[in-house]
Amino acid sequence: MRNKKWIAVFALVIAFALVAVGCVSKTAETVEVGNEKVQTLYSVVGERNITGSSKSTGTDGSKVEITYGGGGVAIGDVNEYISKLVNEDGFLVTKDASNDGTGQSYQIGKQVGEEGKVMLIDFYFVDGGDTVITYTVTQGTVTPS
């Protein structure tokens, strides 16, 4: 009986670990959100250490968030990725870069598939720390900043 409990606890721990970091592969060329696909950071700059990811769908749309930890993403990586998406994939800068004293944030977006849907990509970069990229598909229109 004791072994069965231990095995059940171990299985739950493994399942939670897979859900916590298993949403997005480190080497995935694309990420899918709200039935739309976009190239990943990996596809532009190569593999970086993913320390967390999550997917959600709600009244405000579908969202995928990827966290790259430990300073493994440089500002040059973020700029190269944004540049590729803007210059080759039709994204527009929707919020100019801003600095909150800790990190820098950026946003790009474009109209996608369904009428009235947009994909927004938010970037939050901390030099030497975590970089969080959030992909959202929601209702709206894209207006360049």
Image (cartoon, rainbow, N blue to C red):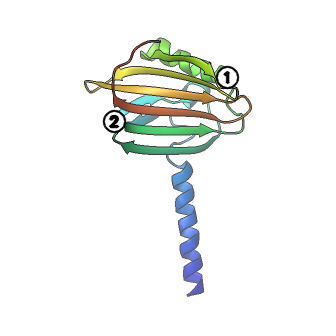
Left or right: where 19 falls relative to 99: left
Q: Amino acid at mark 2?
A: Asn
Q: Residue furthest left?
A: 115
Q: Which residue is mark 2?
A: 35
**x, y percent for residue 4:** 54, 81
Q: Amino acid at mark 1?
A: Ile
Residues packed near mark 1 inside 10 Å, few (<14), some (14 to 19) or many (20 plus): some
Rounded to the nearest angstrom, the CA distance separating label 1 from label 2 is 29 Å
**Depicted 68 relative to depicted 93: above or below:** below
Q: Secondary structure at mark 1?
A: helix
Q: Who's the residue at 59% across and 85% down the image?
A: 2
Q: Which mark is residue 75?
A: 1
**x, y percent for residue 47:** 62, 34
**x, y percent for residue 134:** 50, 33
**x, y percent for residue 92:** 45, 14
The front one of 44 and 81 is 81
**Depicted 3 relative to depicted 107: above or below:** below
Image quadrant assignment for residue 7: bottom right
**Depicted 4 relative to depicted 122: above or below:** below
Q: Earlier in the sequence, mark 1 or mark 2?
A: 2
